[in-house]
Image: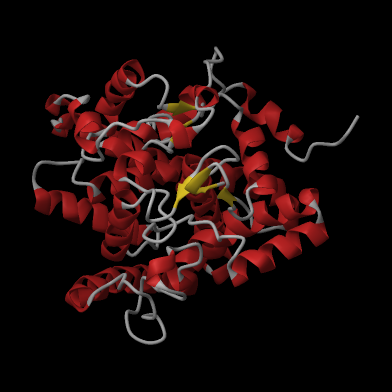
Amino acid sequence: MAFRPYSFCYAAVYLIRPSSRLTRSADLIDSPQHITYPSKADLLNCLPSDLTRINPAQAWRSLAMSLVLSLLAYAVGTQIPLQAIAAPVWLMYALITGTVAGGCWVIAHECGHNAFHPNRRVELWVGFVLHSLLLVPYFTWQRSHALHHANTNHLEGGETHVPARISSPSGRLVEACNRRLGRGLSGILALVFRLLLGWPLYLLFGVAGGEDYGAPTSHFWQGRPFRKGRRVLFPDSFRGSMRLSNLGLVVMLLALALASLQFSLARVLCVYGLPYLVINAWLVAYTWLHHTDVDIPHFSSGEWTWAKGALQTVDRPYGPLLNLLHHGIGATHVCHHINPRIPHYNAWQGAALLKQQFPELVRYDPTPIPGALWRVASRCWVVRRDPAGAGFYY
């Protein structure tokens, strides 16, 4: 029997998998270049305006759940001995705490879309504090993430998880390395590299950012050498917001430094650093699987439209436990891309309405998450132009 690198993960997700396998809507999309896509207005009109109504009590309950569970989990880490024999306990601690704290990341993400609280000042502070605690530059992330939503799966104007074209120097290099290493080893390296290093490398240097913004770019500095593209990722008018984002991170890093002096660097690296890696891995895994697969097209400028890009987002079966902890971000992401102002507790209804109105276009892939992640990591390296569709790249 051939070894599948992801097979050992299936037992771990058995208890959180959905109880039924739904039809994969993506299977119905045989030739996307021949589809007549709806307009942006058609998609937005499918979702009633009531869905954008914020329920502050529900929002605070969601925040309280994620924050309290996270604090309890981190508190456990302060009691685990710093000994080699406790390594399995630390591993379990990191997985559980990082997974639970990912819910705080999602709430801050909702603040960034003005979907958390009707009072914009309250919302700003909640998002800023949560993301600063997780070492995310809130305001610069908010801008780059807005560009991601405005240009989903756009090869030139897109932002985050933009694949390299096989015709580009970086694309040829990636293709050559992967072919030399083979699919198995390349897939393993892609998983390790992206899940552990992908998020900080994106923030620091714009790795996997959009073509139009040049390389490198940075969420922390807008001057040279991070300003080479046809478009400016962070214009001069954004300088004050970038400084405020950086200030939040400096305060958090100082707090971690003081904690290291008080309790030891090893304790801080284990209690804070290990879950930090897991939080980032969840973030990258979600975004990667939302917008990438072997049958999902990316578009050049001549073919791209907002509706085309938004409809290439994929909902996937993360199961009831992860949907609870992460507020359904992986199971209602198509709805989120159609209207990001819809709060997570209303997104379930929005997702159902979209599937009812556009059953042949709304993508749902029932592949278990470990299998889908391995397929994307081992097969989605670069994009090539589809001869049947001039501006479609797979």
**Which part of the image, by quadrant, shows the N terminus?**
top right
Front-most of 286 and 90? 286
What is the number of callouts on the image? Answer: 0
Q: How is the image coloured?
A: secondary structure
**Residue 218 screen position, x and y as percent:** 40, 73
| Residue at 55% across, 61% down | 164
Compared to residue 268, the image places residue 215 above or below, namely below
Q: Residue furthest bottom?
A: 224
**Residue 295 screen position, x and y as percent:** 57, 37
**Residue 118 screen position, x and y as percent:** 10, 41
The answer to whether residue 98 of the structure is visible from this angle is no
Q: Residue furthest top?
A: 20
Compared to residue 53, the image places residue 198 above or below, namely below
| Residue at 34% across, 32% down | 37
Q: Residue furthest right?
A: 1
Compared to residue 59, the image places residue 383 above or below, namely below
| Residue at 75% across, 33% down | 7
Front-most of 235 and 179? 179
| Residue at 36% across, 67% down | 252
Front-most of 309 and 323? 309
Tell me: 379 left or right of 93.
right
The answer to whether residue 318 of the structure is visible from this angle is yes
Tell me: 359 left or right of 243.
right
Q: Which image quadrant is residue 157 in?
A: bottom left
**Residue 64 screen position, x and y as percent:** 29, 37
Front-most of 35 and 356? 35
